[in-house]
Amino acid sequence: MELQNFEVKNQKIKEMFLKMKSESLEKFAQRLNLSWSNWGFGMESLVDSAKRLQRAGIEFIELHGNRYGQDLGYKSIEAEKILSDNGLRVSGICGMFSPDNDLSSNRGIIRQNAIDYIRRNVSLGQELGAAYFLVVPGAVGRPKKIDDTEFDRSVETLRCVADVFTLANIKGAIEPIRSAEVSFCHTIEEALAYIKALNHPGVQHINGDVYHMQSEESHIGEAILRCDQRLVNLHLADSNRCALGEGSLDLDTIIMALYIIGYNRQGCFATPEPLGPGGDPYPAMYGRPDKEFLDKLVQKTVSYFRRREEAVLSL
């Protein structure tokens, strides 16, 4: 039977993976670095989140960029002790960009909020040894465009503060988001165009998200290959935005594509962010945590990911 188009693409990636494995087996010795994005745990203490991730065997955490004001968010000394006590290191900071701190806003005070927010949270990342900071060019939860120049305003605003990334030695990583949640920058190609327009050494990387990619890309594996060395973090959730293994996501092809681009190296992370189905996910950051549910969510996801990784590497 003739293969479907996506199966043809899957097969090409598998052939590339097997060829690379046969020629350079040593490149597959290191496993992918698994992190977890903690803002989806809601109003839970960092202590409880850290203990959960330690129990699941996770060594990295993507911290919620929760310094929304001078008196808000993580205190570095306290956070560092909690994470160290639980064997965790910070992979990156998840920047949260809402209509209140929208880089592309047509209101100057909102754009200044975005600049100040980035400064505070990049400082958090620098203090805790983060490798990257995630930037969304437009507001999450605002899928309707403001006007035809929001891309240009976003670039202009981020350029005002982009030096903080180079000074902090943190990679600015642009995240494309599906069109149901943001008004522009939906695909890897559009993220690359944004990076090119910005033209700043501090913002040269991409934060991918497979949930958004399945809506906006023709093939997730090919999109990962297109990112190549620019990919610094990849958010993971199954096709229904639930735990890995609970939907129809082709995780094996994703894992193969990651190994092809040498993603199993220091400073690159696969980061589950299963937020559940729905529209704007940001309200989840203020939800009341169901500890039993979250424990199972993490354990299921980590166990399934590692099983599939080993299955792929045994090919």
Image (cartoon, grey):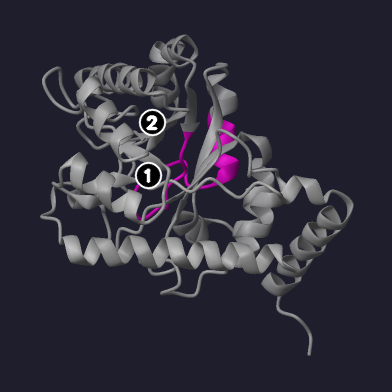
Residue annotated with mark 2: 150
**Image position of 20 with respect to 6: above or below:** above
- The picture places residue 114, in percent across and down from the top left corner, at 28, 23
Q: Residue furthest right?
A: 23
Q: Type of residue at label 1?
A: Ser
Q: CA distance from mark 1 to mark 2?
A: 9 Å
- In this rendering, the answer to whether 60 lies above or below 55 is above
Location of the C terminus by quadrant is bottom right
What segment carries the magenta color? Answer: 174-194
> Is residue 34 found inside the magenta-colored segment of the image?
no
Q: Are marks 1 and 2 in contact (CB under 8 Å)?
A: yes
Left of 314 or right of it: where is 133?
Answer: left
Closer to the camera in the image, 3 or 34: 34
Residue 277 in view, yes or no: no
Local packing at callout 1 (Cα closer than 10 Å; few below 14, some 14-19, many 20+) is: many
| 131, 31: nearer the viewer | 31
- Residue sitting at 28 percent across and 30 percent down? 102
Q: Which mark is residue 183?
A: 1
Can you tell which mark lies on residue 229? none
Name the spot of residue 224 as percent of width and height, x first: 63, 49
Quarter location, residue 204? top right
